[in-house]
Every structure is written in C-alpha cells, then in structure tokens.
Amino acid sequence: MSGNYIGLRDQALRSARSDVPGAPLGRPWGVVADLGLKGGTATIVALADGHASMYFSSGAGYIGGGQKHQRIRDAARIAVEAGIAALPLLESAAVFPLPPAGRVTFFVLTDKGVVAASGVESELVASREKPGPLAVLYLAIQNVITQYRLTQQSPN
C-alpha cells in the first residue's frame, strides 16, 4: 500500500470546513468513500466546492478534477448532497479502517466530526430500482468515477 495513498486519504478524512472554500455553514462539506477491491482500495473524495479526487492504494490517482471539469465538479456536489441525505443512517466515527473486498464505507465530514456507514457493494448495486439513501450515495460516488473516466476519454 502506497504511503502517498494513506497520507492523502488521511488528509481528506481529517479536513476541516475551512479547507473547503465556500462550504455552506452548518452543512456537511464532504464525502469520502472507500471501495474495497480484490487488489486493494479505491478512495473517492467529493467536496462541497466541487473538488473531487480518486486515490488508489496501489499509488495511482487523480487529484482536483473538479477544478478543470464542470462534469466532475457537478458530480462531486451531488455526492455531497447524497451524503447529507444519508446522515440519519450514519454514526460517529473516530477510526477509519479500510473495508475488505466487496464492501464500501462512506464517511461524511461534518462540523461535529466524521460520521460513517458501511454496506455490501453488491447489495448497494442490487437496490438500484428502489435505492435507499446509502445506495443513492453509492450511485453518486460511482458518478464521480464515471465523470473522471469520461474526461480521460475526451478533453472537453
């Protein structure tokens, strides 16, 4: 596991509202989602200002796509809104373990600290027809990934 990955993930999880320019007062300002993969972990960061990054435990990643691409910026903001909608299902978190393969952990950054929930990825995917708040959050995170992929295919 890359030391850069751990550092970037930790920085995202321990960020403060003051790190996110223009984040609305009194509302969560960010979502960090860890996707447990067979070969490691992917971490997706979405912030209220439209910043979005993807970090992989292998050391690869993309940082700040929302600064360059409106589609990524919009996807990041939608993900934060989905995180806010999921708040009733989240609990306070003081430690941030990586999920095993097949699981997803969501962290929402709030003024009162980080709150979290975890789910089985296959169940989140299966509930697309009638998604609950965690499935909606999962889909929003997947949209951030999709927008990154699309910008890699087309510079516009």
Image: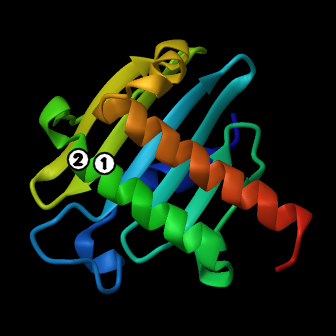
Residue that badge 1 annotates: 83
Q: Is residue 71 left or right of residue 113?
A: right
Q: Which SS class for mark 1? A: helix
Q: Are marks 2 and 1 in contact (CB under 8 Å)?
A: yes
Q: Quadrant of residue 25?
A: bottom left
Q: Quadrant of the C terminus?
A: bottom right
Vertical relation: 121 (above or below) 30: above
Q: Is residue 46 left or right of residue 48?
A: right
Residue 44 x, y percent position in the rendering: 55, 48
Look at discs 2 and 1 and give the one toward the viewer.
2
Q: Quadrant of the N terminus?
A: top right
**Residue at 33% over, 63% down:** 15
Vertical relation: 121 (above or below) 79: above
Residue that badge 2 annotates: 85
The foreground one among 131 and 53 is 131
Q: Amino acid at mark 2?
A: Ala
Q: Is residue 118 left or right of residue 128?
A: left
Residue 46 x, y percent position in the rendering: 46, 59
Viewer can see residue 92: yes
Q: Amino acid at mark 1?
A: Gly
Q: Is residue 93 left or right of residue 111?
A: right
Q: Quadrant of residue 97?
A: top left
